Amino acid sequence: MGAGSKVSRIVKRDGRVVEFMPEKIAAAVDKALKAVGETEGEAVSVDLAREAKERVQRGFRGRTPTVEDVQDIVEKVLIEAGYVAAAKAYILYRQRHAELRDAKRFFGVADDLKLGVNAVKVLERRYLLKDESGRVVETPGEMFRRVATAVSAVEKKYDKGADLSAWEDRFYRFMTEFLFLPNSPTLMNAGTSLGQLSACFVIPVEDSIAGIFDAVKDMALIHQSGGGTGFSFSRLRPRGDVVRSTHGVASGPVSFMHVFDSATEVIKQGGRRRGANMGVLRVDHPDIIEFISAKEADGSLSNFNISVGVTEVFMRAVQEDERYPLINPRTGEMVKELRARDVFDLIATSAWRSGDPGIVFLDKINEANPTPLLGMIECTNPCGEMPLLPFESCNLGSINLSR
């Protein structure tokens, strides 16, 4: 800037030199006056802002002021004009924002979107990319750009002439203006070598040691990538049933659920966010009573939501106060009968005590199953809103309805 020239540039706190915009002074003065209920009209704001702008021009001829320099001048103008309360409000505003900037620096995040401290803390812990030493290597804005670039690239698959930059910019704007946010795995993994963008999966659990631990392995890999998992344990033989290969007896589905729960606990300690599971057992499984009460002990199955898969047969039996059969899934034979209302009362009591189990209406879900030839739906995602076939996934997102 040459000697005697007008101020046209300003130094931001991050060292960038940008265009000096005097209208921002007017906005700052107006906000300070309104914060303390000053009602003398717009003319006062205009006069005070004009005085502050003139002082900037007089005081920094030949030099480039910083943001702090300009804010100091605004404070002095307010005080000298007798608006002490407004000046105090402005000083406190600056102090709060300085504390916010210090907190964000503590997390090692360059906040280019002016987010709150809690948002920056969550982004640093879960979503922003880091190098091998654990140092954050992208800003929140760069994270959203990474996601927008990766997600928009799929448009070429359906339209060879698609303008990818336009789609990218549109999706980027939706996210940075918080009109829409995709699920966590998309924010974590889009544009990375992992590329796992789905929120939740339903994994089948077959009635064998190999099948059970294949499901545990799949669960661990999904949790490691930030996804959640749902399981139906209804195919597992009940506690006390025969195991012909070892001439032993089965321990039942609830015991194996604790294996899944323990594995989830280990994975979440080294992962980027807590793993989540849904466990479903049909109401006509012989171990249903044990399942219903499985979470009543403190800390039991803490990484699971559990739901009883109820059927039309069971609900009619509840309505008519009848008994209904329990079926061994290995043999398809009836083991015994229970009074349906007793079981329904136990579900309600346990849910009141521990928050679980919920209820999944299996027959009603399968009435609306769009692909019945692919199989029956037996389970949902961890939150329960997405019924899924085995190995299906769901991609979730949040729309800001207030905007």
Image (cartoon, grey):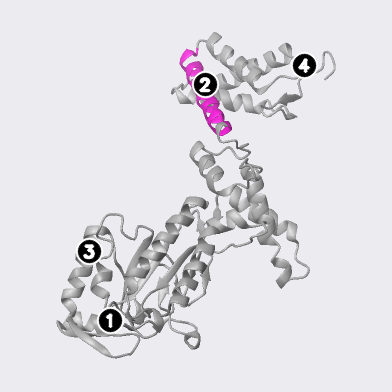
Sort mark 1 into few (<14), some (14-19) or many (20+) by Cα contacts within 10 Å: many
> What's the CA distance linking mark 4 and mark 1?
81 Å
Residue farthest toward the front in the current orientation of the protein? 247
- Where residue 377 sits, quadrant-wise, is bottom left
Residue 97, compared with residue 285, is above or below; it is: above
- Closer to the N terminus: mark 3 or mark 2? 2
Q: Residue at x 59, y 17 (%)?
A: 74
Q: Is residue 79 left or right of residue 303?
A: right
> What's the CA distance linking mark 1 and mark 3?
18 Å
**Residue at mark 1:** 284
Q: Residue at x 68, y 25 (%)?
A: 22
Sort mark 3 into few (<14), some (14-19) or many (20+) by Cα contacts within 10 Å: some
Amino acid type, mark 3:
Ser
Which mark lies nearer to you, 1 or 2?
Answer: 1
> What's the CA distance linking mark 3 and mark 2?
54 Å
Amino acid type, mark 4:
Arg
Q: Position of residue 30 (x, y in %)?
A: 54, 25
**Residue at mark 2:** 90
* Disc on res. 63: 4
- Closer to the N terminus: mark 4 or mark 2? 4
Q: Is residue 88 left or right of residue 137?
A: left
**Residue at mark 3:** 350
Q: Position of residue 314 (x, y in %)?
A: 24, 82
In this orientation, does residue 79 appear? yes
- Closer to the N terminus: mark 1 or mark 2? 2
